[in-house]
Amino acid sequence: MTTRDIQSHIEEIYGLEISPTTVSRITESIVVHAKEWQNRPLDEIYPIVFFDAIHYKVREDRKVRSKAAYTCLAGHKDMLGIWVGESEGANYWLGIMTKLKNRGVEDILIAAVDGLKGFPEAIESVFPGWEVQQCVIHQIKNTLIL
């Protein structure tokens, strides 16, 4: 999205008129805080972490493309990180596991995951000895598929 797209959207939704320069300054400020958050040190041990990707479509370079937002949620409220990739894959998850390790995570006791092929091996290569728990939603979905 361009600053003018954001300006237009804010005016349309909220009736607030702001300049593209203001949008740019706000965005630059937010990006700094977002990078600090995404690179903050993490705890050494997490009892349970939910790993999942949310798929969505975006308009980019005048084309509609699929993207995946990879999320790592520890417990019920600690978002460890969000990363955006082209599509969900075990290799991308391996990179995320390495980033978590580099930010201080030494052990994950239970990893709640979907049935993505190669995902358990990606986790095992960085955090050996973890327990896998297939996500309840994916368990239900898999029982309904014939």
Image (cartoon, helix red, strand yellow):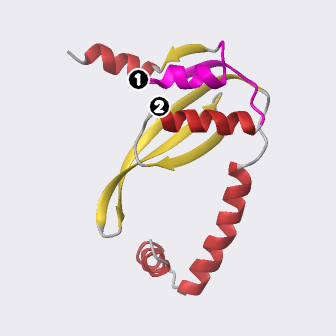
State how many labels appear. 2
Give the residue at the far left of this rendering. Answer: 146
Q: Residue at x 71, y 51 (%)?
A: 37
Query: In the figure, residue 111 lies in which quadrant?
Result: top right
Task: Give neighbour class at mark 1: few <14, some 14-19, many 20+ (Cα, 10 Å).
Answer: few
Q: Are dots 2 and 1 in contact, CB under 8 Å?
A: yes
The image position of residue 7, as x and y in percent, is 48, 80
Residue 15 on the magenta segment: no
Q: Label 1: state its secondary structure.
A: loop
Position of 121 relative to 74 (above/below): above
Q: Which mark is residue 128?
A: none
Magenta range is: 104-129
Q: Examine the rendering and report whether any part of residue 77 can be seen.
A: no
In the rendered image, the quadrant that contains the N terminus is bottom left
Query: In the figure, residue 55 lies in which quadrant?
Result: top left
Determine which residue is flagged by label 2. Answer: 90
Query: Which mark is first along the chain, 1 or 2?
Result: 2
Q: Residue at x 65, y 72 (%)?
A: 28
Determine which residue is flagged by label 1. Answer: 117
Q: Is 18 situated left or right of 114 in this image?
A: right
Circle 1: residue type: Lys
Q: Examine the rendering and report whether any part of residue 133 can be seen.
A: yes
Circle 2: residue type: Ala
CA gap, disc 2 and disc 1: 7 Å
Task: Give neighbour class at mark 2: few <14, some 14-19, many 20+ (Cα, 10 Å).
Answer: some
